[in-house]
Image (cartoon, helix red, strand yellow):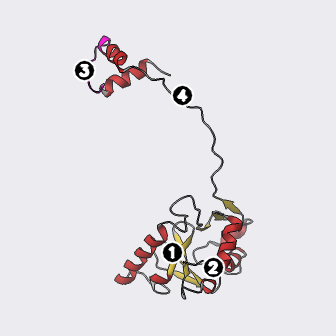
C-alpha cells in the first residue's frame, strides 16, 4: 500500500515517538507491535472494527475496509487514515475513535495538517483534553537508548558430581544418575553464593 507523502516526510523527520506524551504516530520501524505501522496491529484492529460493524455494535465513519490504524491518542483511542480512494494516499482524511469505538471524529486533511491543527489548539478533538496544550508541546522519540553492558556475575561451570556429593554429605537423597533434584541445587547455591 502506498503511503501519503506528508507521512513519509514526517516519519523521516521524526521517527517513532509521541507528541506531548499523548499522541503517538505509528512508524515502519516502530519498536513494539503497537507502534509498528507495518506490523500486524493495523490488521487486528481492522478485524475488530469489522466484527463490531457486522454486529452493529459501533458506528464508524466509513466501511472498516477503508480504515487503516496509524496512531493513537491517550489511553487506547485510535487514529486512522480513511484510505478512500486507495490509490490516492495524499487525499486520505483522518479519523479517530474512543477506545471502545463509540465516539468518532473525522478531520478533512492530512496527518501533518491534523497534528498541527490539534497541537496548536485550532481544532478541538473530543479525545484530547484541553489541559494537554497548557504546557509547550514536545516530541519524545521512542528510539531505544544505546545498549549498555551490565556486569552480571556468573557461576563458573560446576561438576554435577560434586553437587551430588555435597548433597549426600548434607543429608539429601540424591540419585547417582539423572537430574540433580531442584531442592538440592537450590540448597547448594545458597551454600555457595557468588
Q: Give the distance between the C-alpha atoms of the residues marked 4 and 2, in whole angstroms.
A: 50 Å
Upstream in the sequence, badge 4 or badge 2?
A: 2
Residue 173 lies within the magenta run: yes
Upstream in the sequence, badge 1 or badge 4?
A: 1
Where in the figure is residue 109, as x and y percent of width and height?
A: 65, 84
| Vertical arrangement, residue 135 with respect to residue 65, above or below | above
| Vertical arrangement, residue 143 with respect to residue 127, above or below | above
Upstream in the sequence, badge 2 or badge 1?
A: 2
Upstream in the sequence, badge 4 or badge 3?
A: 4
Is 101 in front, or is 64? 64
Residue extent of the magenta highlight: 168-179
Judged from the image, the secondary structure of the residue bearing numbered disc 4 is loop
**Mark 3 neighbour class, 10 Å CA radius: few under 14, some 14 to 19, many 20 or more:** few
| Vertical arrangement, residue 178 with respect to residue 120, above or below | above
**Mark 4 neighbour class, 10 Å CA radius: few under 14, some 14 to 19, many 20 or more:** few
Question: Which residue is denoted by mark 1 in the rendering?
Answer: 98
Judged from the image, the secondary structure of the residue bearing numbered disc 2 is loop
Question: Which residue is denoted by mark 4 in the rendering?
Answer: 153
Question: Which residue is denoted by mark 2 in the rendering?
Answer: 4
Q: Residue at the location (53% across, 73% down)?
A: 78
Question: Which residue is denoted by mark 3 in the rendering?
Answer: 175
Amino acid at each position: 500500500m502506498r503511503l501519503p507523502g506528508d507521512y513519509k516526510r514526517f516519519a523521516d523527520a521524526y521517527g517513532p515517538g509521541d507528541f506531548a506524551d499523548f499522541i503517538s504516530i505509528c512508524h515502519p520501524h516502530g519498536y513494539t507491535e503497537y507502534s509498528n505501522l507495518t506490523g500486524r496491529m493495523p490488521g487486528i484492529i481492522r478485524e475488530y472494527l469489522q466484527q463490531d460493524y457486522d454486529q452493529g455494535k459501533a458506528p464508524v465513519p466509513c466501511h472498516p475496509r477503508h480504515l487503516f490504524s496509524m496512531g493513537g491518542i491517550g489511553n487506547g483511542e485510535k487514529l486512522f487514515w480513511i484510505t478512500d480512494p486507495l490509490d490516492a494516499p495524499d487525499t486520505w482524511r483522518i479519523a479517530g475513535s474512543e477506545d471502545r469505538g463509540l465516539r468518532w471524529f473525522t478531520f478533512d486533511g492530512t496527518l501533518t495538517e491534523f497534528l498541527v491543527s490539534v497541537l496548536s489548539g485550532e481544532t478541538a478533538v473530543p479525545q484530547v483534553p484541553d489541559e494537554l496544550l497548557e504546557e509547550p508541546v514536545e516530541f519524545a522519540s521512542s528510539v531505544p537508548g544505546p545498549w549498555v553492558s551490565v556486569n552480571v556475575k556468573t557461576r563458573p561451570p560446576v561438576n554435577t558430581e560434586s553437587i551430588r556429593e555435597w548433597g549426600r554429605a548434607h543429608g539429601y537423597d540424591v540419585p547417582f544418575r539423572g537430574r540433580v533434584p531442584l531442592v538440592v541445587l537450590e540448597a547448594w547455591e545458597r551454600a555457595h553464593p557468588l
